[in-house]
Amino acid sequence: MGNITLSQVTKTFGDVEVIPPLDLQINDGEFVVFVGPSGCGKSTLLRLIAGLEDVTSGKIEIDGQNATELPPARRGLAMVFQSYALYPHMTVRKNIAFPLKMAKMSEAEIKKRVDHAASILNLSDYIDRRPGQLSGGQRQRVAIGRAIVREPAAFLFDEPLSNLDAALRVGMRLEISELHKRLATTMVYVTHDQVEAMTMADKIVVLRAGNIEQVGSPLELYRTPRNKFVAGFIGSPTMNLIEGPEAQKHGAHTIGIRPEHIEVSASDGPWQGVVGVAEHLGSDTFFHIHDSGLADPMTVRASGEVSFRHGDRIYMTPRTDLIHKFDTQGQRIA
Amino acid sequence: MARAVTKQRKTINTIAAWAVGLLIFFPILWTILTSFKTEAQAISDPPVFLFFDWTLENYGVVQERSDYMRFLWNSVIIAGGSTLLGIIVAVPAAWSMAFVPSKRTKDILLWMLSTKMLPAVGVLYPIYLIFISLGLLDTRIGLVVVMMLINLPIIVWMLYTYFREIPGEILEAARMDGASLKNEILYVLTPMAVPGIASTILLNFILAWNEAFWTLNLTAAKAAPLTAFIASYSSPEGLFYAKLSAASTMAIAPILILGWFSQKQLVRGLTFGAVK
């Protein structure tokens, strides 16, 4: 089981309130991602759940039990750190076995579990090496191995992929997702990368300055962002946010249109502008368009076959049913 | 771009390095050489360097006149005891400063170090009086305590620097893995800090071994270590150069040998944190 409930949890460092009163429910088996810009309090929130930081006020329950005052060791959670935090003086085997040794498990059981974890994570060939002799990806697997052997109530991941190079990151992302499907254990995952959040999460928690801006499935957040911040944060390339007369036509202070919801043409459309930079990804091309009198630049996502050059005049047709409207406070207008 | 080092330049560097090394080592070398001379040769003018009648006589005389082993034993106890005591006091202090720092931690560290800037003689009188009233004068336990206190700031500083290099996340990982504070220190912290603790012990042992001001002022006969042993041969009257040299050689030999075998560890300890 891995239900985690936060009620009115706050955290202040000195005079600085990092987490204002916050409520959150994480259900058993869910993959929950905390996402937000740096300094939004997502890591602090994870550390509060882990017990590595004490809450200033409020209550944390794990599986219905009050864990607010429990030390990390007794919360039944496992954590994977950004820096991997492996024990450099121990072999891979000893690293993975450490939590079991602390739990005073029998040698035979420890061996069985470590071997099993190593085979799941393709670490069997490196089992007698030390962390210093492993690559970044292998180290990350050892850290995950150390977390899974204990069969914890939930896994906590603190930006586990940010030290890996791009290619490895995609691979590890898949591995972690598959691990989640296989173990069906609650996972709480912190990242600043909205692509990781979108691809991995069952539920995304968008944070800004310690406040929860929105909680929902990736598609909910993508389709119906509750405010301008979430609208701008979720989705890549980011949503075009337009103010002024064009927004007023739609009865809003600000309207938002995603780059992929705009059709382009060389001859006609209600909006027009001049092509600046074109980013060719092969399958898609992102055009950054200036002098449209809307947002500057406007970003448009077109298929890879569409070809415009720097300085070309371009016409845009937004899909009006997919325009998001926000009021003066930046809140969504239904 | 790497600097191009020509062969010629390398040779000059090597010679310069040896020259500086010899210059620093020369007084010790001269002392050792003198200890094998007769008293007459020791003061001969011009001085003789290698071509003299090598003799072990001085060593015999020194051993006859004073009990070297007793001084040596006192030195071992004072240096070893003060180091051990210092480590026991400093480890928890350095742990807390490195891993649970408060707003004033830096100030406390600086303040501790500033005590090393005082001339020792400034507190000689009060300490001497305290020693008299506590009956610690000329006792090994008294010297152990004073020596520990004298070197404590350095021990705490060194350990603090080492502990700071240990990433906090690894300790947090141990906590998450279910380790109690005891197990965290035993299985994770200590093994990672062993090189640091070892070189701290080594350096402190050497400092305590060589310390002369307090050992000379607070001891008379019973607790006198090797520093007092050497001093007893420096006399304004009579011809004692060769014997003084023999005594000095005997006094520095143990620490020189210890230093020789542990120089790698020691250099690492002293430059730790400076280069990564």
Image (tube, coloured by chain):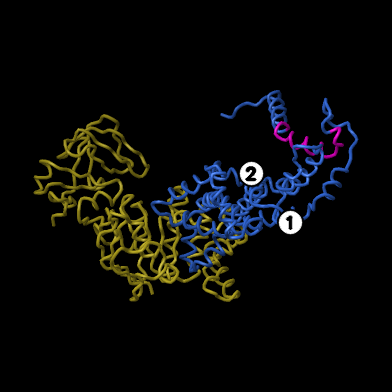
Chain colours: A yellow, B blue
Q: Which mark is residue A306?
A: none
Q: Is residue A53 left or right of residue A100?
A: left
Q: Residue at x 72, y 49 (%)?
A: B226
Q: Quadrant of residue B241?
A: top right
B249 sits to left or right of A56: right
Q: Which residues are magenta?
A: B22-41
Q: Which residue is mark 1?
A: B73
Q: Residue furthest right?
A: B53
Q: Amino acid at mark 1?
A: Trp
Query: Dot 1 falls on which chain?
Result: B
Report whether mark 1 lies on the same chain as mark 2.
Answer: yes
Residue A179 placement: quadrant? bottom left
Q: Earlier in the sequence, mark 1 or mark 2?
A: 1
How crowded pointer 1 is (Cα within 10 Å; few <14, some 14-19, many 20+) is rated as some
Q: Is residue A152 visible?
A: yes
**Magenta segment: does it hold B38?**
yes
Location of mark 2 (residue): B267
Q: Nearer the viewer, residue A270 or A107?
A: A107
> In this orientation, which residue lies closer to the viewer: B55 or A258?
B55
Q: Of helix, strand and loop, which one carries label 1?
A: helix
Mark 1 and mark 2: span between their CA atoms?
27 Å
Q: Is residue B83 visible?
A: no
Q: Position of residue B188 (x, y in %)?
A: 55, 61
**Where A332 falls versus A110 (above or below)?**
above
Residue A47: name its quadrant: bottom left
Would you say the magenta stretch is mainly helix, strand or loop?
A: helix
Callout 2: residue from which chain? B
* Mark 2: secondary structure: helix
